[in-house]
Image (spheres, grey):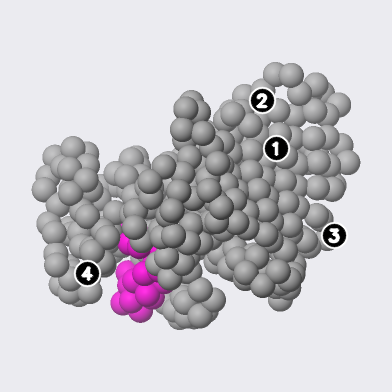
């Protein structure tokens, strides 16, 4: 597969070099804005592939000239949708950092482009490929929890000093679409339910003078089948914490309770008392998942791999937090 890369902003782009399927040829890199320095990406590409990564000064020209099979998009977040649309209209598969779009108009445009294209789009919703969440998914599918009654999730990061494009809603998109989206996707994916209504609150307090960055958000969701769900997302993790993130999920069912915490899965049901973690199942690397999807795979792990549903819920939650009212999704 011939692959181009646009940007180096989100933190997940390195996974394009970690797959086991291939071979892949990395035929070009370009930035879409002044915020996207490519030096680190070029060093990583050389380290992983042993070859220099050609750099272009215009991403559109790069795609037109190289005609890659796929493009990995890691631009400033407000550019994701336009770059992906441009590629899809030219039959180029898209492996995009999340969120798929930072506004509803962009998401609508992107969904139309995806529907009209033979190419596929795959969002870097990396939590699906963490062994602990993958194990939780398989556990739910086994019926161990019975009928689900409640779902909850947490995504917590260290704030640190963020790149300048984070400081403005126009280019960042918001903490709910950037941080909470992982847990939104997890709850939709783990439960197999669609969100019908969302209500959220958020704050920018304590962001260290970093513009519009929201430091914390609480989201209440109504999922299909009268399933209540909740998510908290924040940048409040202390700098001396042993890990950058603290991701958690809790699912309550009629037969048991499942918790994901500290990269382990705990189950309380008729056979497990919740004191010892379950053995972890290990999915394939996320980029191999992308390769399989563009080759026609229908494994359930790739349900809504474009990330459109999670993105639409997050944009609705952000609107709810801005307006102070619930938002229905139809």
Q: Earlier in the sequence, mark 4 or mark 3?
A: 4
Position of residue 50 measured from the top left corner of the image (x, y, whole percent): 14, 40
Residue 93 shows up from this direction: yes
Q: Which residue is mark 4?
A: 59
Q: Left or right: where does residue 123 sit relative to residue 190?
A: left
Quadrant including the N terminus: bottom left
Q: Which residue is mark 2?
A: 278
Q: Earlier in the sequence, mark 3 or mark 1?
A: 1
CB contact under 8 Å: marks 2 and 1: yes
CB contact under 8 Å: marks 2 and 4: no
Residue 193 shows up from this direction: no
Residue 285 image label: none
Relative depth, front residue between 107 and 164: 164
Q: How many marks?
A: 4
Q: Indicate the secondary structure of the residue bearing disc 1.
A: helix
Local crowd size for mark 4, using a 10 Å CA cut-off: few (<14), some (14–19), many (≥20): many
């Amino acid at each position: 597969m011939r692959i181009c890369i646009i940007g180096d902003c989100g933190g997940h782009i390195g996974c394009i070099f970690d797959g086991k399927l291939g071979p892949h040829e990395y035929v070009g890199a370009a930035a879409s804005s002044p915020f996207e320095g490519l030096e680190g990406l070029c060093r990583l590409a050389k380290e992983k592939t042993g070859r220099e990564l050609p750099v272009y000064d215009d991403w559109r020209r790069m795609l037109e000239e190289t005609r890659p099979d796929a493009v990995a998009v890691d631009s400033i977040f407000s550019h994701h949708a336009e770059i992906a649309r441009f590629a899809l209209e030219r039959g180029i598969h898209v492996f995009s950092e999340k969120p798929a779009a930072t506004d509803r108009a962009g998401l609508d445009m992107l969904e139309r482009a995806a529907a009209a294209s033979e190419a596929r789009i795959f969002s870097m919703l990396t939590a699906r490929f963490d062994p602990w969440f993958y194990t939780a998914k398989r556990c739910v599918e086994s019926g161990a929890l019975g009928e689900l009654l409640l779902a909850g999730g947490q995504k917590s990061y260290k704030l640190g000093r963020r790149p300048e494009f984070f400081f403005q809603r126009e280019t960042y998109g918001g903490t709910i679409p950037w941080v909470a989206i992982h847990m939104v996707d997890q709850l939709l994916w783990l439960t197999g339910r669609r969100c019908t209504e969302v209500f959220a609150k958020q704050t920018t307090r304590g962001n260290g003078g970093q513009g519009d960055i929201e430091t914390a958000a609480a989201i209440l969701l109504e999922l299909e089948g009268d399933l209540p769900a909740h998510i908290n997302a924040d940048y409040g993790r202390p700098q001396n914490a042993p890990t950058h993130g603290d991701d958690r999920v809790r699912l309550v069912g009629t037969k048991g309770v499942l918790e994901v915490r500290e990269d382990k899965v705990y189950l309380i049901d008729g056979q497990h008392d919740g004191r010892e973690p379950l053995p972890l199942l290990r999915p394939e690397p996320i980029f191999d998942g992308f390769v399989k999807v563009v080759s026609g795979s229908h494994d359930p792990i790739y349900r809504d791999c474009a990330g459109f549903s999670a993105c639409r819920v997050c944009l609705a939650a952000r609107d709810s937090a801005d307006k102070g009212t619930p938002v229905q999704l139809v």
